[in-house]
Amino acid sequence: MLFLLYILLLSLCHRAPAIRLPSNNSKTPFLLRSKASRDSETMATKEDVQDPRIPKIASSIRVIPDFPKPGIMFQDITTLLLDTEAFKDTIDIFVERYKGKGISVVAGVEARGFIFGPPIALAIGAKFVPLRKPKKLPGKVISEEYSLEYGTDKIEMHVGAVEPGERAIIIDDLIATGGTLAAAIRLLERVGVTIAECACVIELPVLKGREKLGETPLFILVTSDAA
Amino acid sequence: MSRNKQEEDPRINGIKTKIRVVPDFPKKGIMFQDITTVLLDPKAFKDTIDLFVERYRDKNISVVAGIEARGFLFGPPIALAIGAKFVPLRKPKKLPGETIFEEYELEYGNDRLEMHVGAVEAGDRALVVDDLIATGGTLCAAINLLERVGAEVVECACVIELPELKGRQRLKGKPLCMLVEYR
């Protein structure tokens, strides 16, 4: 019964029909609208299945108004990192989801993806691959451009870090417009890697980042209407 | 000042062989110590973390401060394993809340390291983590930031030391633990 509920909610939330990761875990955590959001919650349905660890994680995230510029409500995860239980729970939820699923690569987007990615990689026995801003990685790199509000930016990965046929997850602290994650997906797919899922702590659904990810599913712990 | 190198541990050699040296990066003459190849080897990465965790788990460390960005790769796993909070020390303008900063010297000019106000409290026992110690300038700035808010810096921990740059002498008397030397 719980499994059927999971499938229903997954198809509602992911839009992409394919379920990439079979889950044995009937306690698969689901979305909780962040209490940190200034705007009132709108769409928490009665069917939302909540991992009991999620509320504490959500409440440990600090919202900073007008950073980096006026009008933006910045989701600050550094306060989550100060809460040892919330940080551990965050990692545990991701590890429970990805352990034993044939994931050999955890790719983390600089810099906050570096905080969450390595603990997950270590716990599931995968390698960690940093995806970095230009000119940070020594040695030979491949790069992928993506659009910003004004102009473009690039992310880079070491040549040879991953091999064709590997299965990867991509980690960042937050998905906003989805530009960076979409670039990360393209970068890994160019070298023959399959992305099983993108995983973020926070989503800002109003920015529709999920739509940029194409067929790649997105897993998140907390959503915020603040954007 | 004690020299804390895990000389006997058989895991050290495995880690050392995974570090890739990239010549002339970021500029000519520099032999860059690339730890990304350690991260590609789950056993070597795990061993690196385990060695630090074994050293610090019973030392009542309440804060692990990691220096952006490669300190973020090693600091959080250590913090999680020993039950300490993780505090990122960042380049200017990255941290969103109220910050304090410490300036330090580069070869040409200065740079700054920032920390969030309130992240660390007086009386916290802190570990500072980075992938590598070269001149020790960044680590010294990190120690200063932590001491200014009343924390006690117990030790600095780095995967790699470049001993010829004498960074160890710039740590305000704090001990350094490293795993691999590169001469």
Image (cartoon, coloured by chain):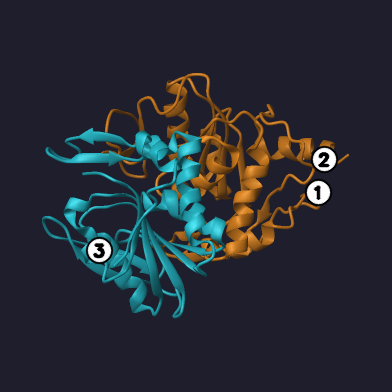
Chain colours: A orange, B cyan
Q: Do the residues bearing badges 2 and 1 touch, measured as CB atoms within 8 Å?
A: yes
Q: Is residue A95 above or below residue B56?
A: above
Residue that label 2 marks:
A5
Horizontally, residue B141 falls left or right of residue A178, namely left
- Name the residue located 52 percent from the left edge and 61 percent from the top edge: A81
Q: Position of residue A160 (x, y in %)?
A: 38, 25
| Disc 2: CA contacts within 10 A as few (<14), some (14-19) or many (>=20) | some
Q: Which of these two is toward me, B57 or A203?
A: B57
Q: Quadrant of residue B93?
A: bottom left
Q: Chain of mark 2?
A: A
Q: Chain of mark 3?
A: B
Q: Secondary structure at mark 3?
A: strand
Task: Give the numbered dot on residue B31.
Answer: none
Please identify the quarter of the rendering in which residue A68 is found. bottom left
Identify which residue, A8 or A105, lies in the foreground. A105
Viewer-nearest of discs 3 and 1 = 3
Q: Do the dots labelled 2 and 1 sit on one chain?
A: yes
- Which residue type carries mark 2? Leu
